[in-house]
Amino acid sequence: MRVVLVANTLWSIVIFRPGLLRTLVRMGVDVVVMAPVDDTLPRALELNVRVIPLELSAKGTNPMRDLALVRTLVTRYRALKPDLVFHYTIKPNIYGSIAAKLAGVPCIAVTTGLGYAFVNTNLVARVAKALYRFAFRFPREVWFLNGDDWQDFVAQRLVDPAKTQVLPGEGIDLAHFAPRAAGVSDGHVRFLLIARMLWDKGVGEYVEAARLVRAVYPQAVFQLLGATDVANPSAISAEQMRTWVAEGVIEYLGTTQDVRDIIARADCVVLPSYREGVPRTLLEGAAMAKPLVATRAIGCREVVVDGENGLLCAPKDAADLARKLQHIIEMGPDARATMGARGRRMVEQRYDERIVIERYLAAMRRVGLRITDMPAA
């Protein structure tokens, strides 16, 4: 039995879905991942999956290259003869679905967040929606990670609602992201934003909010963790990051293969994003019992219950974000700990990765694969 996963980055499969990969491998499934290779390749190989490099530009708009991608995928699908293909992110969802139809293999499209095509309204975004409408006729099922994204696709007639499902995000490994001892005990409240460094993630508003908060609480620490100069129209440059660091308003932590130590030292995890699927970084922060601050944007508001496990602010509003961050400082460590504990309980109830993995196994059964029950953890 062979299952193929296709995405625009290898790290998104390795970092976001390791539990799924381990489960399928333990069940004897031949798991193949197709994506552009990056520095997570050793981790992918440790999971005992096959990795086939795929030439794919996430931000490119050259139709000839996209046509070449379809041809490549058709050729590979016919050679591999997979029993099922899962597509993630925009280009694999669109062109992979078309290729799977041409190759005669069943596929499922997983919309992990609508990103640039829905945050913006330019010609590229309109073309992307038209391509979605065409390509999403072909998957057996189309999955969404939150109800708002599902509603947008259905309302704009981009997908047949009868073939859709809404998952509770990608799930989180509760044992891996377990609460640890309290953060750094120097009296300085640390805020942490983990994301690819994109303007659409609200990084600019976070930096401006840091300026506002530090004018009142100069000892507050604002950290950024994630890659600059990524392949995205909304990318923040390394030069811009150096400017902020030189100003002294933020600490830039670069990138890491394991975020847990950095989350453990933080007092609050922040994500002022414009739109998300279900943001992994907020789930990780909540699982480690950290209070959250995020926008009332699609995806973020799925994870943060205002006043319970965190605070919500208006999107694209640095002043409102600053007010909420200042409130986190002023509530004190005991109240922050209580808020974080509520977040941990919520993640345990809603976002355990075993719930999501079982949804994958059920889908495999629906396409006719003989799948047993999930093995014990």
Image (cartoon, grey):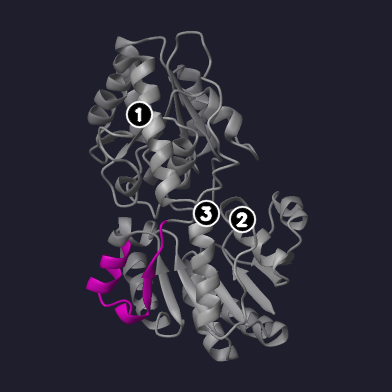
Answer with the quarter of the image where residue 331 lies: top left
Identify the image quadrant of the N terminus: bottom right
Q: Is residue 207 magenta?
A: no
Q: Do callouts 2 and 3 mark residues in contact (Cβ within 8 Å)?
A: yes
What kind of element bears circle 2?
Answer: helix
Position of residue 9 in the picture relative to residue 53 (left or right) = left
Query: Is residue 65 visible to the viewer in this orientation of the structure?
Result: no
Q: Residues within 10 Å of mark 3 (few under 14, many from 20)?
A: many
How far separated are the C-alphas under marks 2 and 3? 7 Å
Give the image location of residue 29, x and y in percent: 70, 72
Query: Looking at the image, is 141 positioned above or below residue 124?
Result: below
Identified at 45% across, 45% down, the residue is 348
Give the image location of residue 258, x and y in percent: 63, 38
Position of residue 216 in the picture relative to residue 372 (left or right) = left
Identify the image quadrant of the C terminus: bottom right
Identify the residue under disc 3. Answer: 353
The residue segment tinted magenta is 149-168
Identify the residue under disc 1. Answer: 339
Tell which circle, 1 or 2, labels the residue nearer the N-terminal end: 2
Instruction: Tell me the amino acid under the disc marked 3.
Output: Glu
Instruction: Tell me the amino acid under the disc marked 2.
Output: Gly
